[in-house]
């Protein structure tokens, strides 16, 4: 299984979003996003994940399917 933080970073960079932009779009704190991407937070809360996925334009179930490949 891929780490969720690495997948979030991959999609974020693919969309050409900085951490600050994703934080603004999702309403999730920039330092919290950074910790997720670096793997310091391995199991982010569902509510925050929904906000992040929504800002990235990815449905949560699709994203999680990709993360387990």
Image (cartoon, grey):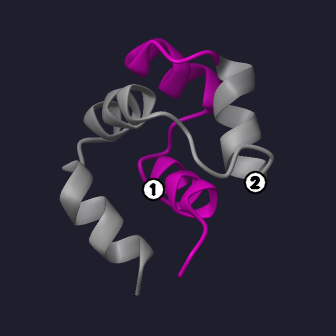
- For marks 2 and 1, give the one nearer the viewer: 2
- Which residue occupies the foreground of this view, 41 or 21? 41
Write down the residue under mark 1. Answer: 11
Write down the residue under mark 2. Answer: 39
The C terminus sits in image quarter:
bottom left
Residue 47, compared with residue 13, is above or below; it is: above
Residue 6 is situated, as x and y percent measured from the top left of the image, at 62, 62
Name the residue located 49 percent from the left edge and 47 percent from the top edge: 12
Residue 33, compared with residue 66, is above or below; it is: above
Query: In the visual, does 22 lie left or right of 69?
Result: right
- CB atoms of marks 2 and 1 within 8 Å: no
Name the residue located 49 percent from the left edge and 45 percent from the top edge: 16
Q: Is residue 56 magenta?
A: no
Rendered image: mark on residue 45? none
Disc 2 on helix, strand or loop? loop
Q: Main secondary structure of the magenta part?
A: helix
Disc 2 from disc 1: Cα separation: 15 Å
Q: Is residue 28 magenta?
A: yes
Q: Residue furthest bottom?
A: 69
Residue 32 is situated, as x and y percent measured from the top left of the image, at 68, 26
Residue 28 is situated, as x and y percent measured from the top left of the image, at 52, 18
Name the residue located 45 percent from the left edge and 12 percent from the top edge: 27
Name the residue located 37 percent from the left edge and 26 percent from the top edge: 47
Query: In the visual, does 40 lie left or right of 66?
Result: right
Magenta part of the chain: 1-29
Point out the tag, 2 or 1, that comes first from the N-terminus: 1
């Amino acid at each position: 299984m891929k780490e969720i933080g690495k997948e979030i970073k991959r999609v974020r960079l693919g969309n050409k979003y900085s951490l600050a932009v994703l934080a603004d779009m999702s309403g999730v704190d920039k330092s919290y996003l950074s910790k997720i991407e670096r793997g310091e937070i391995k199991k982010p809360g569902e509510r925050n994940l929904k906000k992040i996925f929504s800002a990235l334009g990815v449905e949560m179930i699709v994203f999680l399917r990709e993360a387990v490949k």
